[in-house]
Amino acid sequence: MTSALYPDKLRLGVNIDHVATIRNARGGDHPDPVRAAEIVAAVGGDGITAHLREDRRHIRDADLKRIQDATDLPLNLEMAATEEMLEIALRHKPHAACIVPEKREERTTEGGLDAAGQHNQLAPIVARLADAGIRVSLFIEASEQQLEAAMRLRTPVVEFHTGEYAHAEGDARARELKRIADMAALAAKNGIEPHAGHGLTYENVQPIAAIPQLAELNIGHYLVGEAVFVGLETAVRRMRELMDEAR
Ligand code: PXP
């Protein structure tokens, strides 16, 4: 049954940042994240996710337009809540923008955005993105406090950070899963579309994919790592199969 509360299909957004990480390691143009985006489109991925970081350690400005030109898949731009990134988002008009916290020294996005504590800083950025027709999402921890903050900011989407879940084991993992499931249900009940991502792998994706209210998972590092061994096409297909089986 499809409804706003229970989307039939769980979309897979593939984060191609780390194709660019490998490219940048040698400073040339291979492997090209655009080619990765084309492969994702060819194997039935539902979207491309890319994080333009302040230090441009993986995706670069010029990649965004090239990705948009190369595929019809919706682009989900992950961005820090800064004037610089806002200006870039407004110029490129991606389908969606996911606001993430960003620290220069971190290796990856380590936690969720403090949407509750940063309401005043986020509100004008969310409003300007929304006015430009960009679907705004906030990358938050699965907590009531953060979800309520997203409601006050009126974002149509939240993405729950699954990093704690992915790193936990046993009972701790079960607790994390319940937290995400409860918050996905609460988000959907309040008209917010819940997504999830970070640290998802073949091994841990299915309990998350089984949460009926989730509409989208964004997965990157593991898929690009697997692609080294089996190819991106096979890796994306396998992830898709596991997600479908769980549903
Ligand atoms: N979703 C968001 C908002 C992210 O920032 C990231 C990457 O940091 C991902 C999903 C994908 O995480 P991973 O690369 O661990 O699969």
Image (cartoon, rainbow, N blue to C red):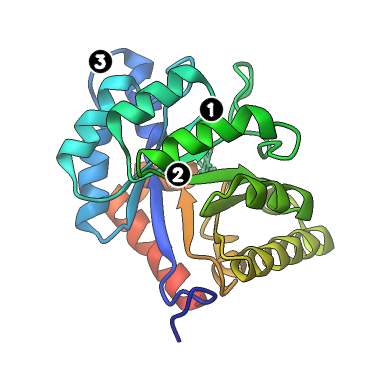
Q: Which badge, 3 or 1, comes first in the chain's sequence?
A: 3
Q: Are marks 3 and 1 in contact (CB under 8 Å)?
A: no
Element marked by disc 3: loop
- The numbered disc on residue 65 is none
Where's residue 71, x and y in %?
A: 19, 45
**Residue bearing the label numbered 2:** 220
- Give the crowd class for mark 1: few <14, some 14-19, many >=20 residues within 10 Å: many
Up the image or down, 134 lies above or below 4; here it is: above
Element type at mark 2: loop
Q: Residue at x 57, y 51 (%)?
A: 159
Point 69% across, 61% down: residue: 180
Q: Which mark is residue 28?
A: 3
Under 8 Å from ligand 1: the CB of mark 2?
A: yes
Q: State how far apart marks 1 and 2 are (Cα).
A: 18 Å
Residue under the image location 57 percent in, 52 percent down: 158
Q: Is residue 24 visible?
A: yes
Q: CA distance from mark 3 to mark 1?
A: 26 Å
What residue type is disc 3 on? Gly
- Disc 3: CA contacts within 10 A as few (<14), some (14-19) or many (>=20): few
Query: Is mark 1 in CB contact (under 8 Å) with mark 2?
Result: no
N-terminal of the pair, mark 1 or mark 2, is 1
Give left or right: position of 40 versus 101.
left
Q: Residue furthest toward the left?
A: 70
Q: Position of residue 173 (x, y in %)?
A: 76, 59
Instruction: Give the residue drawn at x 45%, y 87%.
Output: 1
The answer to which of 110 and 231 lies nearer the viewer is 110
Marks counted in the figure total 3
The residue carrying mark 1 is: 80
